[in-house]
Image (cartoon, rainbow, N blue to C red):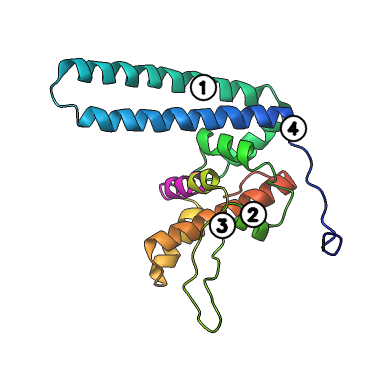
Amino acid sequence: MGRAPNLAADPLPAPEREELALLSRRRDQLVAMRAQEKGRRSEAGETSFVRDSLDETIAWLDAAIVRIETAIAARIQADTALKAEQDLVRSLPGAGPVTAAVLLAQMPELGRRSGKQFATLAGLAPLNNDSGTRRGQRSIHGGRRRVRQALYMAAVASLRTQSPASAFYHRLPQAGKPAKLALIALARKLLVTLNAMLRTRTPFAT
């Protein structure tokens, strides 16, 4: 069975991408901790010691996030290939520095596989829910959750631009698609577009 598909081995991740992935994941952890502390802060009432303790922790987390974002930017700037790919990703409407870092760190296959494969890897491909003769509703699931989140936020941000991405989204609700499904479709389109951009080394053209 292993020989039949004639599968090619994936290349080992480059050390600089592994380091970037570690930094990106640590940033996510710090952001999640800050969100938890802010939630606790809203429930702390007027108990001064608890309130002050939470404020100190939130301030520390704010500073730690700034430091790690600086380290991420320095890691990308120090590597010619990463810097070139970041510039391509940032040319896409809605793609900011966080989205670019997440994609570079956690989707190193960009530009090296087909668009359909990428949609599945990112959990943005609608998968069937069939059993026997029953045909269930298609839905997205699985894949790389953090990549999917980054692309979804890029899709939301792109709606504030005057770009083909925004125009693509607005056509879908007009055709009867629910807003959330339209955003998922836009996120999937952004991923496929990014894959083509990195494969051809061509920035986004408006």
Q: Secondary structure at mark 3?
A: helix
Q: Secondary structure at mark 4?
A: loop
What residue lies at 62% left-to-right and 29% top-to-bottom? 20
Query: Mark 4 near mark 2, Cβ–Cβ under 8 Å?
Result: no
From the image, which quarter does the N terminus lie in?
bottom right
In space, the residues marked 1 and 2 are separated at their CA atoms by: 28 Å
Give the labeled residue for mark 4.
14
What residue lies at 68% left-to-right and 32% top-to-bottom? 17
Give the labeled residue for mark 1.
68
Q: Which residues are magenta?
A: 150-161
Apparent side of residue 56 relative to residue 91 in the rendered image (left or right): left
Q: Amino acid at mark 1?
A: Ile
| Chain-order first, disc 1 or disc 2 | 1
**Residue 167 visible at all:** no
Q: Amino acid at mark 2?
A: Phe
In space, the residues marked 3 and 2 are separated at their CA atoms by: 11 Å
Q: Amino acid at mark 4?
A: Ala
Q: Secondary structure at mark 2?
A: helix
Q: Main secondary structure of the magenta part?
A: helix
Give the labeled residue for mark 3.
189
Magenta stretch holds residue 89: no
Magenta stretch holds residue 153: yes
Query: Above or below — where is 188 with respect to 149?
Result: below
Residue 163 image offset from top left, x and y in percent = 49, 51
**Residue 86 visible at all:** yes
* Camera-nearest label, 3 or 2: 2
Callout 4 crowding tier (Cα within 10 Å): few <14, some 14–19, many ≥20: few
* Camera-nearest label, 1 or 3: 1
